[in-house]
Image (spheres, grey):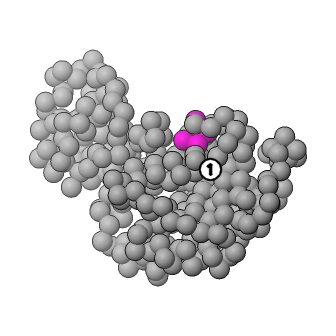
Amino acid sequence: MCDSSSFSLRSSRSSFSLVSFPLVVSRLRNAGCVFAEDEAELIVSAARTPDELEDMVVRRAAGLPLEHVVGWAGFYGLRIAVDAGVFVPRRRTEFLVGQALALSSPRAVVVDLCCGSGAVGAALASAVEDIELYAADIDPAAVECARRNIGGSGVVYEGDLYEPLPGGLRGRIDVLVANAPYVPTEAIALLPAEAREHEARVALDGGSDGLDVQRRVAAAAAGWLAPGGHLLVETSERQASRTVEAFAGSGLMTRVVECDELDATVVVGTRPGGVRRARVAHAAVSR
């Protein structure tokens, strides 16, 4: 079943839309798209030629995520580029951004691990002045998207979790955000077809209980965080208690925050310590 819930931005229709729009709505509705009119407007607006429009409608009717069809997703008021196969940022993750923003300040050192398309990092960079932003992901296609979305606001590395980050960041990170995969392996088959068939498995599969990657993030976090620095991870309400155990086992002071409206749960861990050093005193990290 088609679903356009991650889109919040709308564009004006292209020159051939008056003729095409009703036909596109009909074809999408017949394909099972619940929000056929909204999706048709986005597709018609994105298409530059009648041939491109036809191709986009065919791909959407076949079950390709709308975001992959039009090439972007609306997230935190931004238009985030999303290529085929790349994890589509979820609206619930806007709650993670909000929690990270509450802990960020100008010139803070911010790292977005498991960054995917770079949506979280891009949102933070757009909302907080002069942050020192780094991001990393293991998926090359996601890294390519993240570099476009983050642009000159930060540096994006390809590699596994902390491995590609500059060593000079150790002990300096003020806000570490990790939207790591947390779907248990056996539950992948229960995901909507748009996710399980069209998004990278590495962006979804969190291992036997869904927390394998989160545990690895938490285990090394204290060595990368500045004193008083924060680690934030999105998880599910059901998994939150085990995420808390992983954080606490790594020496982090932990709390859980939730948003019923977005069905979102975030675990926040803080490295104990005194007042963090002034940002101006930090040596520049090699880029």
277 or 64, which lies in front? Answer: 277
- Which residue in the structure is indicated by mark 1? 103
Horizontal side, residue 264 vs residue 147: left or right = left
Q: Secondary structure at mark 1?
A: loop
User: In the image, is residue 31 above or below residue 218?
Assistant: above
Q: Which quarter of the picture shows residue 260?
A: bottom left
Q: Position of residue 281 (x, y in %)?
A: 88, 44
Q: Determine the residue located farthest toward the top in the rendered image.
A: 15
- On whether residue 125 falls in the magenta region, the answer is yes
Viewport quadrant of the N terminus: bottom left
* Camera-nearest residue between 27 and 152: 152
**Point 73% across, 66% down: residue:** 272
The quarter of the rendered structure image containing the C terminus is top right
The reply to whether residue 280 is in sight is: yes
- Say if the magenta span includes residue 262: no
Percent of width and height locating residue 92: 40, 53
Q: Position of residue 220 (x, y in %)?
A: 71, 71
Point out the residue furthest to the front here. 274
Q: Nearer the viewer, residue 96 or 206?
A: 96
Give the vertical position of 3 relative to 78 (above or below): below
Q: Residue at x 79, y 55 (%)?
A: 275
Query: Does the rendering let one see residue 166?
Result: no
Residue at 29% x, 62% y is 193
Kind of residue at badge 1: Leu
Residue beneath the point at 57% across and 36% down: 127
Span highlighted in magenta in the image: 122-126
- Mark 1, other Cα within 10 Å: few <14 / some 14–19 / many ≥20: few
Spot occupied by residue 95 in the image (x, y as percentages of width and height): 46, 51
